[in-house]
Amino acid sequence: MEENIKQKRELIAAISDLFLRFGLRSTSMDDIANHLKISKKTLYQQFANKDDVVEQVMLYRRDEKIKNTDVDQLAKKNPIVVMSEIRDFMVSDLGSRLPANHFDLKKYHPAVYERVAKQEEESTKKFLVALLDNGIKQELFRKDIDKELQLYLLGKQMHFLKNPEITSKLKYPISVIISTIFVNFIYAISTEKGLKEFERLKNTANRPEDG
């Protein structure tokens, strides 16, 4: 049983790579079977239809994204460092073919999109609320911040950047835009202590290595 789960997860990972290489809409069930050198019968034993394939791939990506973000471990990490790690992840994420997959998902698999988006929103919110609470405990973030509002604004800006029709027309590089969004977010929620820590970390990161 455990071996079957592992094999299916490996199959989903391979399909995820195909979607990134060739596009979600353009990759048919025939394409998947041909590229992975399996029969369509075998493929349909694992998935009911393409909607099922797409949903399981998106849930797999979500699980991969959050498997190393244990909420219980947040208390051991500097919240501002974690915010920087999230920023770097978003730059990598939105600089890949993932936004195009996201756009195709919403346009051609709307029911799947709604289910996956809801689950991802819930898990992301849980993680970020824990992160903000940890920052408040460490007196890096202000006690009086409206967490719901701040996370809503951050989420809307990130969602806006997932549309390739928008990102293809941006005036500035996406890395610059994402970095600016996160800097503004940190400045909006940080105490004086938090801002000093942010500047310290920024200066450390920009400092040339010795030798």
Image (spheres, grey):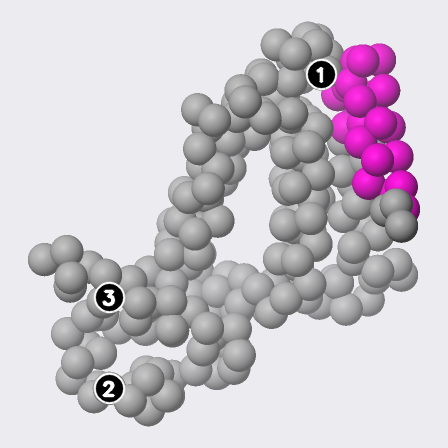
Q: Quadrant of residue 29?
A: bottom left
- Magenta residues (range): 186-208
In percent of width and height, residue 106 lies at 50, 61
Q: Residues within 10 Å of mark 1 (few under 14, many from 20)?
A: many
- Residue at numbered disc 2: 38
Residue farthest toward the front in the current orientation of the protein:
211
Look at 65% across and 12% down and name the residue there: 138
Closer to the camera, 99 or 77?
Answer: 77
Residue farthest toward the left in the current orientation of the protein:
1
Look at 43% across and 52% down and name the residue there: 64
Name the element at disc 3: helix
Residue 195 belongs to the span the image colors magenta: yes
* Figure check: 15 above or below 188: below
Q: What is the CA distance from the residue labelled 1 to the residue labelled 2? A: 52 Å
Look at 62% across and 57% down and name the residue there: 93
- Residue at numbered disc 3: 8
Name the element at disc 1: loop
Question: Main structural element of the magenta stretch: helix, strand or loop?
Answer: helix
Amino acid under disc 2: Ile
In percent of width and height, residue 204 lies at 84, 35
Q: What is the CA distance from the residue labelled 1 to the residue labelled 3? A: 42 Å
* Figure check: 153 above or below 161: above
Left or right: 97, with 127 as reference point: right
Disc with the residue nearer the chain's start (1 vs 2): 2
Q: Which mark, residue 159?
A: none
Name the element at disc 2: loop
Left or right: 97, with 13 as reference point: right
The quadrant of the image that shows the N terminus is: bottom left
Q: Which mark, residue 141?
A: 1
Q: Quadrant of residue 70?
A: top left
